Image: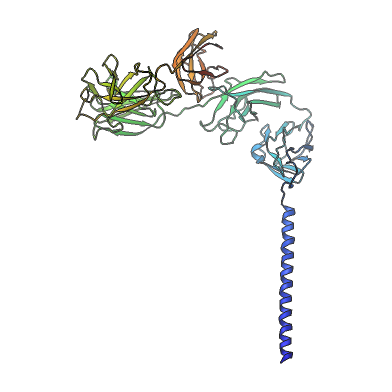
Amino acid sequence: MMNRIGKREFAYFNLKTKQHMKLIRALIAASMATGMVACATQSPPQGGPRDETPPKLLNSSPKDQQLNVDTRTVVLEFDEEVQQNTLNKELLITPNINNPYKVIPNRNTLTLEFEKPLRDSTTYTFNFRNGITDITEKNKAQGLKLSFSTGSFIDSSRVSGTVVNLMKQTPEKEALVLLYQAEDTLSVRKNRPYYLTSTDAQGRFELENVKEGNYRMYALVDKNNNSYYDTEEERIAYLAKPITITPATDTVKLQTVRIDTKKPILLNRGKFTDRFVAGYNEGVQGFYARPVGAKDTIMSKALPDGKTIELFKTAAFSGGKAILAAVDSSGNSTSDTLEIAFTGKPSTRIKGAALKVMNSGQNAGYRIGQQIVVELQTPVRIAGKTPVRLMTDSVVVQELQYPEQVKLDQTNTELSFDIPSIGSNIRQLTIALDSTAIQPLEGAAIALPPLDLAIIEGKGTTGSLSGNIATDYTSYTLQLLTTDYKVVEERSAAKNFRFRNVAPGTYYLRVLIDENGNGKWDKADPEFKREPEPVYMHPTTVEVRANWELEDIDLKF
């Protein structure tokens, strides 16, 4: 019995020992695998300063400026291990070769292998931009450019310059500059260019090693990265005439614009007892409507969104077939003929009355002397002498007289008045509208709620600015702009200017120059046959302060 027990104990011990050895071997194997993965994974070394040195090109085949090159590969050798960084997007090869290639990285070497031999007797430039980085910290190779020729000489013509946004006069960063041979049929709307480069952060560009000749020249803010202009969402600059590029070409300034050739589209219609609503797909700058067969226009107004037009029922027009014509800010026009009926329920866009949002500058609140516009629910008539009272703490501050102080617009849906002088300590006003004096043209009386106004520092909270203009141009428009380039006010051509009652804040001054003297500023031509007329931006912003007049601003253009 003891012998059998001893054998069982020995067998048990032997089994445990084998299991233990298997476990040890498994742990050793896992440790070795982890070590191998760690060795294979590239990561920055722990401790010490971070590597911020970009990879440096040691050698290339072909070499920069090499002649009589005959190859299908371009090989780059660096001082450290490198990788591509969306190279197919970043690499600009000029002239355009339409020759697919694959990228083969091999530690410190990166090879481009083309499907077909490079074209004979051609100067090539490879601009790698940000397309190559090191492995550890992804530092980008700087200024990496390679030029060589498959013939006996290298083209030496060049062109440089700047690209700016026309309406802002600010640099266009990373815009493409495109060259198409003047005699070629390739189109900037459908085809990649013959030569191209990109601008730096200051909007500067330089195209070197260009074959001497005549070219159509463009700049493009290429949103979809296809290197040609195929959507009006992109900004484009162009020269109306071909440019001759030689080794001594003058610098060029290209100014980008948004070209809009799409007509406004009437998307929706609304019928109400007092008005007809027409909704367009974009902002409408000009609009008119008239009955078919008549010359008189139908009373209408645009809503603050710029896309919606309301047409009103009047004694002269109570419905029928009408022509609606709309023009957008680019001058594209459209015309629709439709049946207008004033049916259904009254419009409830405005319930009783509401303050109309106006361009009040950069402050929240209203100033003494500022115009107030009150929108009404439905067209009205004024039957009383004092339809508006201004109140504070239930006390009447002033009653406003009609029509001396209170005006009713031609659609009979808007009251307007200027805030009169009041006590300097008043910071809150309530507009009380007299429903017995303000009566609907049709239907029952409407409830007119009180409207609250916050007054900014009482009287004297605006500033003004003035200056002189020195120019040989005789026709132009001076614009005062907010910092997001919205127009606050405009002035016609004069030797001096002044903007009064301007809300405190920072502004730009811009001039639209009517160079051809036709009485308007001409926008860009969708056919690229005529360049937009010049724009001048005052080089610095102007600061307007309350109770302060900024004088002697000199504009020279």
Residue 497 located left or right of residue 450: right
Give the vertical position of 358 relative to 227 (above or below): above
Q: Nearer the viewer, residue 398 or 394?
A: 394
Residue 333 located left or right of residue 277: right
The percent position of residue 361, horizontal first and vertical second, equals: 44, 22
Q: Quadrant of residue 198?
A: top right
The percent position of residue 195, horizontal first and vertical second, equals: 66, 29
Q: Nearer the viewer, residue 116 or 48?
A: 48
The percent position of residue 517, horizontal first and vertical second, equals: 49, 11
Residue 311 located left or right of residue 556: left
The percent position of residue 521, horizontal first and vertical second, equals: 48, 16
Q: Quadrant of residue 111?
A: top right
Q: Quadrant of residue 8?
A: bottom right
Residue 23 visible somewhere in the drawing: yes
Residue 195 visible somewhere in the drawing: no
Quadrant where the image shows the N terminus:
bottom right
Q: Nearer the viewer, residue 479 or 106?
A: 479
Direction left: furthest residue: 444
> Residue visible at 65% across and 40% down?
88
Give the vertical position of 308 relative to 8 (above or below): above
Give the vertical position of 462 relative to 351 (above or below): above
**Coloration of the structure image:** rainbow
Quadrant where the image shows the C terminus:
top right
Q: Nearer the viewer, residue 196 or 154?
A: 196
> Residue visible at 38% across and 20% down?
425
